[in-house]
Every structure is written in structure tokens, then in C-alpha cells.
Image (cartoon, rainbow, N blue to C red):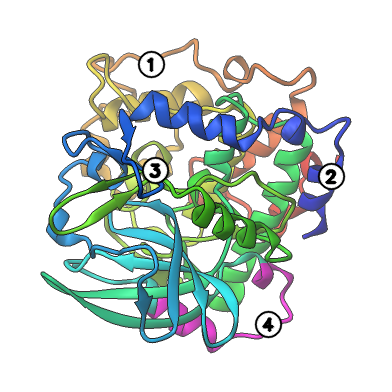
Amino acid sequence: MASCRKAFARLPSTPLRKHFPPIPSLYAHILTSRVPSWPLSGLGFDVIDKYQPIEEEGIPEYNPDHFYPVRLGEVFNDRFQTVAKLGYGSSSTIWLARDLEKHQYVALKVYIHNSVQHRELPFYEHLNTLLPSKHVGADNVRKLLASFQVSGPHGNHIVLALQVSQMSLRDMDTVFMKGRGFEEDFVKSAIKELLQAVDFLHTEAQVVHTDIHPGNLLLGLEDNSLFKKLEDNEFSDPVPRKELTDRNIYLSRLMKPKVGPLLLSDFGEVRLGAGPHAGDIMPIMYRAPETLLYIQWSYPVDIWSVGLTAWDLLEGRTLFSARKEDGSFSDGVQLSELIAALGPPPAELLNRHRKRALEYWDENYKWDEFVPIPKEKTLEASETKLEDKTKFLAFMRRALAWDPNDRPTAKELLLDPWLSS
């Protein structure tokens, strides 16, 4: 865990801190560039135009009735009082809250009421049977502190009280690095801690995460001072909000990051057991070959995701777009990009689901050229930041092996020469 902290602390060589702009000016820039607002005299906060979509309202197929109308200052379960909004997703909103019983900060994850299948709570119930653990990677997995249900206007909502954290590495890259990615030493440190977490999940918890990417890698915190300051800021300078008849929608409160351990989060798509499992998983641009080819999958899908996460953190962009020229997603385009970067897949892999393979390859497993291979998008040509890329590209080829049986375990990948160089 110390490795990620060390990379944070090297101020002269690590641009992560050097490029942090002051939060007040940063917040003002984001606010004024995203939403029009005007001060409402006497209340101390700006009110946002009710016709301007903000936050979760921008999610495709957003339905306000699915979301619980959280209000700042609201007390949940006679114990947790919300003090600031931290973020949102397609299935939940996240809030900083005070635990009035244990006098600590927590993150409340308030789910939409119509979740078809809730996987995160069963995972945490399973995880808690394994804790405390001597495995070093257990400290890199976000913990559940409590869970309960709250009744909303349109149904019941599951609420998880989680270990509080700072922003995700994806948001850090977007806000502070302008989408350019991080320096190599920081990426190595983050990937080491991620692999520790993945090894714990695979060997002790025996679960497949299936959704590893920079948006689910959070910075933990070693003390509460940052959250105390955030709470004080909300009191003295409340965030702008939209006031509607049945709810308020608040802007998420930004924080200037501090050094802390990496936490793997968001277990909403986790699968218990090694499997083999079947079915559609993973964000589109992160899908492993076995999922594209409708082959059963297991732990190696997470190793594939670790490789692509390393690429994203370093380069500031995804390796594969999976998009056609019109912007729509395409399995064929994604497979063609894999071929360009990694070479052709082994015939033995295609044989595992021949019917699916024949949609894109001929009988002899020659690629049908109705989807052209972007031959210029080799792994070597796509990497543009490193002067010496040999070890990094070798790491990528190990993690991104076509055949899942050829990918190393998390423990094996931790010993890779790139990570130890």
C-alpha cells in the first residue's frame, strides 16, 4: 500500500500534485461551464434553472421516480446524517454522511428502487465473513460498514454505508490532469495496489469483479480532516442546487485529493465463485475476448481489465474504441482492434464457440474483411508517452493475452518486470 503513497509524495518528480489547481477556482470553472445559475438572495446558495439537466438527470433513460430524493441534512436509519453529495451513477447516488453513533464519516450509497438484481450487498455479506484478513490486498477493497432499506415515494431503496473515500482515479485524471493520464511511477504504484486487491478477491474471497476500470478505483484517506473541511465548506458555502416540487438535485462537492491508499470499489456486477460463468459483462470498451466470443469466463476477465486500466491511467484514453465511424458500438470493430494490437487469436480459442467465430472469420479462421483491421493501431504505435516502452508493452501483452488460460494470475502479474523496474 505504501507504494501509491510514495508516488503521491514525490512532489518534484510527480506532476500529480504540481498540476492540482486550487479547488475554489476549479469548482467555479466547472460550474459556470456546465450549468447556468443565479443567486437566490437570503438562502446562501445558487439555484439552478429547473429546465437545465444536471448530475443524474443527464443519465440516459433517467427516471426521477427511480431515485430516492435525498436532502442534505436528512438522517437515515436514525444514525447517518447527509452533509454533502459526492457523486452519482446510473443506479445510485453517493453522499458523505456523519455516523452519529460511531462519530465517523461514511459514504452512503442510495440505490434506485427498481434494481433488478442486487449483487453488491450479497458480496459484502460474503466479504464480511472473511474479515479481518491477513492478506495485504484486503486493505485495498472498499468495506461495508452497515446496510438498511429506506422507503421512498415510489418504493424501497437499499442503502449501503461504505468506507468513505476521495474521488476516483478517472475523475482525478479528468479534473487535474486534463485527461492526459498520469506519470509512469504513479501508474505502477496504482496497478500494484489494484493487483493486491484482485489477488485477495480471486484467492480468498473467490469472486470475479467484472467491472474494473479507473472509475472504480478510489483514493482512500488516512484521516478525516479532508471530510471535516468538506462539511465545513458545505455549511459556509452551500453547493448550487435545483429545487423541484418533489426533490432537490444538488451538484456534487469537489475535493482536492490527498495521499491515501487505493480502494477497489463498486461490486454491483460481481460474481460469487470461480465459475465458469456466462453472460454479458464488463463495460463495452473493456470487454475481454471470451465475452465477445460468447465463451464462458472466470477470473482472467479481471486480469484483462487490469491491463486496460494500466493503459488508461498512463495514456489518458482507452486502448480500444469499439466504435464505428458513426459512433455506434460494434463487436466487429472491437475484434478488429484487438487483432491490430495483439495479432490474430489462436484457432483453439475460436473453436470454443465456432458458431460465434464464423460471424467474423471464415471457415479457416481468416478474418473477413467486411470489417477492416486498423493496421496502424498496433500496441507499439498506440503508446505515445514513454521513451522506453519495452517493459510496459510486455506487461500489456501478458495481461491482454487472447486466450484467458494464457493470462497470468494477479499474484504472478505483481512480479512483472515493468512493475518492479
Amino acid marked by disc 4: Ser
Chain part drawn in magenta: 122-139
Residue 270 appears left or right of 140: left
**Quarter occupied by residue 366:** top left
Closest to the observer, 139 or 359: 139
Residue 37 occupies which quadrant of the picture?
top left
User: Sequence order check: which comes first, mark 3 or mark 2?
Assistant: 2
- Whether the residues at callouts 2 and 4 have beta carbons within 8 Å, the answer is no
Q: Counting other residues with Cα less than 10 Å from the Cα at mark 3, is it few (<14), some (14-19), or many (20 or more)?
A: many
Where is residue 35? Give x, y as percent. 32, 30
Overall secondary structure of the magenta section: helix
Mark 1 / mark 4, whichever is N-terminal? 4
**First reached walking from the N terminus: tag 1 or tag 2:** 2
Q: Position of residue 98 (x, y in %)?
A: 52, 73
Disc with the residue nearer the chain's start (2 vs 4): 2
Query: To which residue does mark 4 refer?
Result: 133
Q: Which residue is mark 2?
A: 9
Check disc 3 and report the residue beneath it: 287
